[in-house]
Amino acid sequence: MAGETHTLPPKTQRLNRVVAGACLAFIGGMVGAAYASVPLYKLFCQVTGYGGTTQRVEQYSDKVLDRTITVRFDTNTSGGVAWEFAPVQRDITMKIGETVEAKFRVTNLFDQKGSGRATFNVSPEMAGAYFNKMECFCFTDTTLKAGETLDMPVVFYVDPAIVDVPELKDIKTITLSYTFFPIEGEKPVAEADKAAAAGASTTPDSKLGG
């Protein structure tokens, strides 16, 4: 009949409330996991060396093996960073456990100040868990004036425990790679050049010439 209402039994109402609460809890958990995933993933990489992530340490190695390993350096720029970036030495042959310093040199080739931030990785990836850095310029903001050159050190050693890993016990070479990216919010050089060119094409002189 018109206007007639139906009331659910109390048991059914309680069941519906339980189901609704469970759904809300699940959604809340998923949202929380999404926010936590990035720092947790970063921590996981730092602890395990997953993805070639190196380790940050505060102390020198207390053990040096009578066995050498070669560390090669690879440098790149991306995202329109107009910098010349290269290692002072292309590789270093060192004893496993020995602490050494490598220097990288970067020069701003553009005619105005620019900023960048370097990321890194190690290959083979499994070696990242045994590549210990005591000093590094990675993940820090670097700003260079037009034409400025800067030398940046990296202090590191290869953990002697690497020889106890079956997959790495015979390793002879590790590659440490760095890539400079523009800092978020910085306009890449390529875009800056386009903007400058567009501005020049709309000057009064260019309009008169057309």
Image: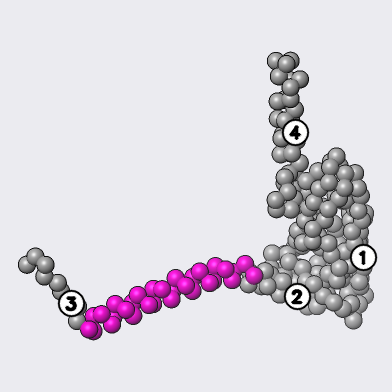
Q: Main secondary structure of the magenta part?
A: helix
Relative to residue 44, is residue 207 depicted above or below? Answer: above
Q: Disc 1 or 2, which lies upstream in sequence?
A: 1
Name the residue tied to disc 1. 101
Q: Amino acid at mark 2?
A: Val
The CA distance from mark 4 to mark 1 is 41 Å
Q: Is residue 9 left or right of residue 178?
A: left
Where is residue 209 shown, x and y percent of the image? 74, 15
The quadrant in which the N terminus is found is bottom left
Q: Which picture quadrant has residue 93?
A: bottom right
Badge 1 vs badge 3, beta-carbon distance below 8 Å:
no
Name the residue tied to disc 4. 196
The CA distance from mark 1 to mark 2 is 25 Å
* Residue at (44, 74) in percent of width and height: 26
Q: Disc 4 or 2, which lies upstream in sequence?
A: 2
Q: Disc 3 or 4, which lies upstream in sequence?
A: 3
Element carrying mark 2: loop
Name the residue tied to disc 2. 165
Name the residue tied to disc 3. 7
The answer to which of 110 and 157 lies nearer the viewer is 110
- Which label sits in the foreground, 4 or 2? 4
Magenta segment, which residues?
10-39
Q: Is residue 209 left or right of residue 1?
A: right
The CA distance from mark 3 to mark 4 is 71 Å
Q: Is residue 58 magenta?
A: no
The CA distance from mark 1 to mark 3 is 77 Å
Residue most extreme to the front:
204
Relative to residue 186, is residue 129 depicted above or below? Answer: below
